Image (cartoon, rainbow, N blue to C red):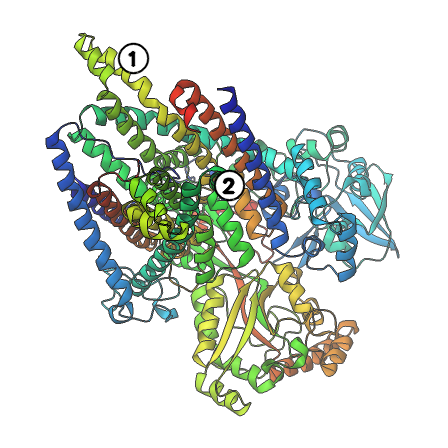
Amino acid sequence: MLLFVFKRLLMALVVCVAVSALSFALMWLSGDPAIAIAGSGGRAEDAEAIRIAYGFDRPILVQFADWAFKALGGDFGRSIYFNIPVSEIIADRLPVSLYLGLMSFALALAIAVPLGVLAALRPNSLVDHIALMIAVLGQAIPSFWLGLMAIVVFGVWYGLVPISGIEDWRGFILPVVVLSYYAMPAMMRITRSGMIDVLNADYVRTAYAKGLPKRTVIFRHALRNAVLPLVSLSAVQLGMLLSGSIVIESVFAINGLGRLAWESLLRSDLPVVQAIILILSLVYIGLTTFSDILNAMLDPRIRGTD
Amino acid sequence: MMGSSFKRCLLGCATAVALTLAAGPAVQAGKDDNTLQVAFAAEPEPLDTYKIAGRQGLILARHIYDGLLYKDLDSGEIKPALAEAWEFTGPLTIDFDLRRDVTFHNGAPFTAEDVVATFNTVVAPEYGTRYSISVDWIDHVEKLDDHKVRIHMSKPFAGAVEMLADALPIYPREHFAANGSEGMAREPVGTGPYRLVEQIPGVRYVLERFEDHYQGSPKAGASIDRIVVRTIPEMNTQYAELLSGSLDWIWRIPPDQARRLDGRVSIISAPIMRISYIGFAPQALGGDSPIADSRVRRALLHAVNREAITEAFSGGASKVLKSACNPAQFGCEQDVVTYDYDPEKAKALLAEAGYSDGFEMEIVFAAMPRPVAEAIAADLANVGVTAILNEQQYAAGVGKWRAKEIPGFFSNWGSYGIGDVVFILSNFFGGGADDQVQDQEVIEWLAVADTASDPAVRQENYSKALKKIAEEAYWMPLYNFNVNYGLSQDLNFTPHPDEFARWWLASWK
Amino acid sequence: MRSEEMPEEAGAATSGKGRALKRVLGSSGTVIGGSVLLLMILIAVFAPWLAPHDPYAQSLTDRFLPPFWHDASHPAHPFGTDHLGRDYLSRLIYGSRVSLTIGFGVALISGVIGIAVGMTGGYFGGRIDMVVNFLITTRLSLPIVLVALAAVAVAGASQGLLIIILSLLLWDRFAVVSRAATQSLRSREFVIGARAIGLSHAAIMLREILPNLKGAIIVVATLEIANVILLEAALSFLGLGVRPPTPSWGLMIAEGRENILFDPWLIALPGAALCLLVLVVNLMGDGLRHLGGNPIR
């Protein structure tokens, strides 16, 4: 078990290094950062001075190590556009995205699990078909389009909810609903299939045979085992919700990390983009590593396979 | 099952489409409770006039604060505001007699101390006034007596009186000293016709009419009791609320939407000083581009249907420009060579210049809507010229222009809102960094016109320059901008070309 | 931008009867999905003959004509015109070309990359597999929409470049599936036999193992096509995908956005087209998965 955890953590660490190298490379692929910082009015001499002042004249590996260690301490450099530390901007925006992501995740879970269980209890019933239909649609509708249509119908025509900005909690209603619908289908399907597997397993049949009440069997025995795949998927989905919010945040004009990333890209503010890519990747790595270890602890069979 | 979910999606899509035909709800207007409901798309900045640049915040600030003087845009006349009279008492001193019957919103009386404290604070570099140009001409202010002050100027500044006209507000001394810039913004206290009674920054501002606003104020006579200003970033929500009556005043409506709203609400289009243009750079690319040939430039002017483009994308008070300036500006000669829309003539001119098969040229555009650029490109394509559109931030675009990298630059110019061609022509044709033409004749005429004091001499030389600019087709002037206001049909409101809304002049019908 | 999760099985049916039903339904999904998809491909191929107008032709006097269900519609433009007076039906028809080209193009290239990577790892195992596992994990850790946006912003966005960038980012699912399948096949008798008669590793992988992955790969490919189509639309919507004036459905939604109050059909129509295409591709994928049993387990 310890060896598995160790191996998993080691892999996570190596991946972290690779991901940070990739996001560091972005800056260099986009051209000379010194010219970018010097700005449009900058002359060649200005760029040269900046090159030396920022240390862009050093070997690239040294620069990478320098950047990575500073990033480790939360220093991602300065934003070219705002001319303030990137970490300050991110600290400002991250909570909004976290809130949006977590709320959507909770809503998706709250709908997906009961629906998946219901569908699994009666395969091919009306409930099952409706659930599947919702899932199939959810996987086909682009979330930004759903968001815009929701804005048209609920915000503009009926004025039920504010449709842009987040003055108060009501501003979160539409984005949370749209974002959760984006994450829900996969969670619903995996709950359903997990549940069907478990319900057919011997121990559940035995429990029924022993004459235990149906409710006890379903909630005590079946559901608990059916959530295993859901745990892994949830980690993936949560990470995705954070990065997937880039589209939703720009549709609903929410000042979160995603919108910041998008706007920074449009104004070529690459230090900000770099930092956001790195942060989102690290969150994802952390979540999946955690869920793998959690899964291994819940299900001893997994440990042997890696 | 799969079939049914498929059908359901079609149904869903169809429903979505069908729903687009439905209509919105209705709410009552603000006339009944004498409250003006206003929306801005961008949020107002903190309400310390000295620190902000956005129109939204400045408009609110001008309702709350007063300056020493006021400019009546309708008559062009400078009027007394907090100062009753003023006089240049020396080359670098101006004396002001202050009004005696003025009180601030918090009840404090207005005295010379307030003027002294405000100006002496904001001129200090450490205060961080946003535009140093607005205050750096003031060295310090001296109190002569309780109602008399003297401004000591640090340098001669022709714009001093204009600047003192409502752009430099007077803050109450004690409140300002105790709370500083942030405190002023958190709890703005002025002498203006409205006082701020509630603010949730970025969300909602509530102004209430100040009953003790001083007699004889140029901003006197406000008739609306309350003004509620909200930030609504999505314009479509603003339209919906305006239509349903929960908003009475919105602005900066794009022409297409203004056209749709017209008739259902009242739409006013007001021209402003800003104009759009395509600048050609004969000097770009080493002077070795088709653009260096005046026949090609004339061909491009004939190729673009500027009437249709102006009508489609600007509309309202906008007109196609004849010469390289806004007709509202002093010196903007209108009797120049014009180029009507004539693709055949354009093709002939191109053939004459040796480009019968057309050519490719890069046009960088900045701070202009993409559809306008695409429409221009489509017109150019009709005569065989392939325009490669490249959208840039303004600074980056100007950088490429100055670096002589691009033959054409499509953007706009506001002349700082001032009605004199000196603020546009010298920049683009006076021989400076933005002048990619470097026509010596034009440079000389402009030099004479810019420095002469006799208006007739100025006019004559500007006229010569503008005639040559048109003759040589150095520019493709497009149209002057306008701002569309969307108003409740119960509201009387007069827009001004400086884009400062004056709600104290508004009233219900 | 769609789920990164493995295509999970749709759930074993409980009884023989249920399983049979599922088969039939699965295949009817394939039939319906497949025929609509075929129809859309034909529309894309024959766009120049089907489109009533040049999708790029502007007419500034005919802007924002409403679609046919409005009274004020114009018979020459059944789906109305956009902000530049371009025929919306023609743009919608040509838009299918962009979606399908990018969808199939990326699925093809990323399929080749992913299968090569996955099979190599699955076949050789050991250190090589560790590297492959590392590559897959790293790729999965990257926030895909953002990285794609950044890559496009840095590299520029011609349609060909867009296909290459997305292909370099979306090979992971192919790799995961072919790796797992190869792992389970490499100790089978026919592989061991092939090795015994002296076939090279490359020959074994290509001739013996690859044909066995066919079913799984086709299923992944359909899912991936749907995934790519949605991703392209999102990138174009955000202004960093296909460049104007090319008619892309995502871009058309972005261009119609300013007018959602007065002309919501400008975003409703391309969105509906997008929905339909992704739906039929997914239905085909689901159907194929049922038909072929469950190749990815």
- Residue B85 x, y percent position in the rendering: 77, 49
* Mark 1, secondary structure of its residue: helix
Q: Residue at x 71, y 60 (%)?
A: A41
The furthest residue to the right:
B90
User: Is B440 rendered above or below residue A29?
Assistant: below
Q: Whole-percent x and y of residue C161?
A: 47, 60
Q: CA distance from mark 1 to mark 2?
A: 41 Å
User: Left or right of B22: which side holds B142?
Assistant: right
The amino acid type, in three-letter code, at marker 2 is Val
Q: Position of residue C69 (x, y in %)?
A: 22, 57
Pointer 2 indicates a residue of which chain? C
Q: In which quadrant of the rendered image does the C terminus of chain A lie?
A: top left
SS label for mark 2: helix
Q: Which picture quadrant has residue C41? A: bottom left
- Residue marked by disc 2: C131
Frontmost residue, B30 versus A249: A249
Q: Horizontal placement of A73 versus A276: left or right?
A: right
Q: Check if mark 1 and mark 2 are on a common chain.
A: no
Q: Which residue is mark 1?
A: A220
Q: Residues within 10 Å of mark 1 (few under 14, many from 20)?
A: few
The amino acid sitting under disc 1 is Arg
Residue A121, above or below C95: above
The answer to whether residue B42 of the structure is visible from this angle is no
Nearer to us of marks 1 and 2 is 2
Visible residue check, residue B312: yes
Foreground of the two, A160 or C187: C187
